[in-house]
Image (tube, helix red, strand yellow):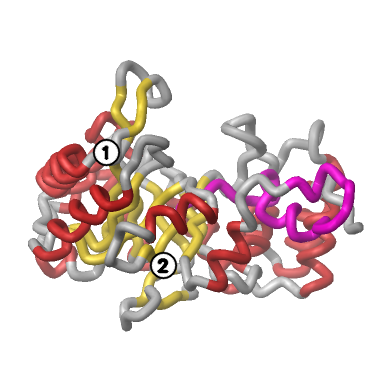
């Protein structure tokens, strides 16, 4: 397994993250087996959010593992909050008020049967957020020992910079959508100072900002195209050339195209984590193989071009 250090600490986090968004569909024994497999493969980072399964994913994760102290110490548990649900997962609004953040963290800790979160992210940008108020919440959470490290998710570079204005703690993580089927962070820099549509900046040069400020990017939906529009690996209709290239390069390393798609993300020197949201043990093991592969520069660009991205 490949590991990164949380900036300014000696804490190491695995390059592959087990995403827990869908584990409420599993039986207790299946969750236990999935988590134990992840740990055996070197994964120490587990991603949760209070809206996943309406909190059921957190609850069932803890119940399946009994959250024994010895096991808890092996894990980096990440929680996310800030989405208020009014119906479905995407039918609501965002709330970064101090009162709501503190309330959410208490609920997360209770469901996960733990005294602290290693990492807390604010889940999607709240346009009404007041950085100073968020800073007060973070200060209270850190001083009480409830949260050790902090970050944002789906935030642009300027949103990140704005939030830093009112927050004393370092914002160490930003969870964003990224993968070979969703590359706006790469495209903007690749076609800078051109009239190509590819050069349109949609993230405030987030990739460069994160590298300059030592922010670890976490890639969610690493195999998806667009906003949950389908998996690119195996989609011969929309991505015939990409799948041909992934298959060919996979053959060189004796791995599947999915492993190469994940290795493509890990090859970037920004040092990104890949969130593996699978509920299958075999797929979890497969994703971990990506951390053992370092694609050549030529292979990385070949994959990028095969996805339909021109090199200016």
Residue closest to the eye, 206 or 310: 206
Q: Residue at x 52, y 53 (%)?
A: 158
Q: Which residue is mark 2?
A: 41
Q: Position of residue 163 (x, y in %)?
A: 38, 54
Determine the secondary structure under disc 1: loop
Residue 240 makes an appearance in the image: yes
Q: Is residue 196 magenta?
A: yes
* In-image side of 264 versus 215 (left or right): right
Residue most extreme to the top:
87
Q: Residue at x 36, y 26 (%)?
A: 93
Q: Nearer the viewer, mark 2 or mark 1?
A: 1
Specify the quadrant that holds the C terminus. Answer: bottom right
* In-image side of 80 versus 261 (left or right): left
Determine the secondary structure under disc 2: loop
Instruction: Give the crowd class for mark 2: few <14, some 14-19, many >=20 residues within 10 Å.
Output: some
Q: Which residue is mark 1?
A: 50
Q: Residue at x 35, y 32 (%)?
A: 94
Residue 34 makes an appearance in the image: no
């Amino acid at each position: 397994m490949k590991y990164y250090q949380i900036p300014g600490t000696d804490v190491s986090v695995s390059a592959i993250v087990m995403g827990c968004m869908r584990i409420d569909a599993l039986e207790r024994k299946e969750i236990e087996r999935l988590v134990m497999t992840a740990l055996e493969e070197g994964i120490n980072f587990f991603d949760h959010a209070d809206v996943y399964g309406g909190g059921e994913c957190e609850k069932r994760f803890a119940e399946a593992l009994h959250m024994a102290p010895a096991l808890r110490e092996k894990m980096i548990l990440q929680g996310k909050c800030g989405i208020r649900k009014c119906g479905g997962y995407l039918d609501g609004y965002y709330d970064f008020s101090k009162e709501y953040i503190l309330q959410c963290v208490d609920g997360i800790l209770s469901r996960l049967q733990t005294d602290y979160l290693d990492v807390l992210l604010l889940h999607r940008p709240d346009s009404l957020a007041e950085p100073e108020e968020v800073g007060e919440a973070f200060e209270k959470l850190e001083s009480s020992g409830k949260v050790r490290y902090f970050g944002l998710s789906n935030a642009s570079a300027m949103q990140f910079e704005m939030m830093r204005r009112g927050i004393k703690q370092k914002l160490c993580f930003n969870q964003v959508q990224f993968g070979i089927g969703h590359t706006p962070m790469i495209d903007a820099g690749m076609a800078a100072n051109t009239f190509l549509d590819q050069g349109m900046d949609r993230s405030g040069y987030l990739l460069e900002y994160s590298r300059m400020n030592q922010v670890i990017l976490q890639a969610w939906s690493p195999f998806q195209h667009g906003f949950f529009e389908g998996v690119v690996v195996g989609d011969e209709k929309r991505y015939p050339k990409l799948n041909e290239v992934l298959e060919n390069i996979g053959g060189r390393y004796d791995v599947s195209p999915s492993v190469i798609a994940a290795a493509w993300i890990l090859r970037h020197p920004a040092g990104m984590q890949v969130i593996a949201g699978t509920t299958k043990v075999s797929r979890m093991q497969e994703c971990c193989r990506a951390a053992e592969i370092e694609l050549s520069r030529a292979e990385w660009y070949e994959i990028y071009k095969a996805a339909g991205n021109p090199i200016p």
